[in-house]
Amino acid sequence: MTKSKKLEFRPNDYVVYPAHGVGQIISIEEQEVAGFKLELFVISFEKDKMTLRVPTNRITESGLRSLSSPDVISQAMKTLKGKAKVKRAMWSRRAQEYEQKINSGDLISIAEVVRDLHRTDDQREQSYSERQLYEAALERLTREVAAVSGADEIAAAKQVDDVLTSRAA
């Protein structure tokens, strides 16, 4: 792997790690593991009070990526406006697909989950597992919208909510 690819990310950059969402690179450190020197990105997920160390040479495999561009954010918002597409498959199969979309790290896929699982007050009650998946997707989407716009999460949550409620009208 080339040097330039490796140093695509720098300390203080916000990044998206598919399985955990938005984090911030706090440093790049070297560690010796089994006699080999490893260069690691140290990524902090403040909200989850978690720190992850990802070898810089495993970035591609890990799916680590930069924050979405404003274009992708508006694409995600457009996705939210769309009509929910709920397959007629069994819930366990759908839940698996939603989970995969959430953990793909792909913002549009995450927005699809939010769209498909969003309920207005007059719609039927969500099951516990539906609500869990919805909240996980919503949180991922909101954190990335906040990180990209530089706004706080509350403002980003309102922005997402406004789109969802305007759709229901």
Image (cartoon, rainbow, N blue to C red):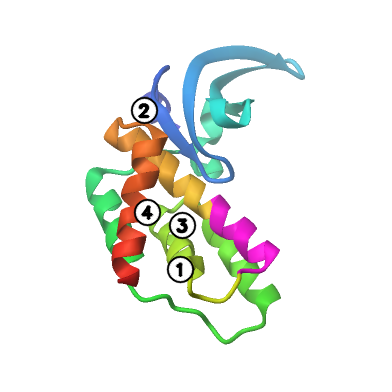
Mark closer to the observer (4, 3): 4
x and y, in percent, of residue 137 in the image: 51, 54
First in sequence, mark 4 or 1: give its number: 1
The residue labelled by disc 1 is 120
Depth check, front residue: 101 or 64:
101
The residue labelled by disc 2 is 8
Q: Can residue 64 be seen by looking at this rendering?
A: yes
The residue labelled by disc 4 is 161
What amino acid is found at the position of numbered circle 2 in the picture?
Glu
Q: Can residue 67 be seen by looking at this rendering?
A: no
First in sequence, mark 2 or 1: give its number: 2
Q: Give the range drawn in magenta.
A: 126-136
Task: Look at 55% across and 59% down and name the residue there.
Answer: 134
Helix, strand or loop at label 2? It is loop
Task: Look at 55% across and 24% down and name the residue there.
Answer: 44
First in sequence, mark 4 or 3: give its number: 3
Helix, strand or loop at label 3? It is helix
Instruction: Determine contact: label 1, label 3, CB under 8 Å.
Output: no
What amino acid is found at the position of numbered circle 3 in the picture?
Ile
Quick one: quadrant of the C terminus? Answer: bottom left
What amino acid is found at the position of numbered circle 1 in the picture?
Thr
C-alpha gap between disc 2 and disc 3: 24 Å
Mark closer to the observer (2, 1): 1
x and y, in percent, of residue 75 in the image: 27, 58
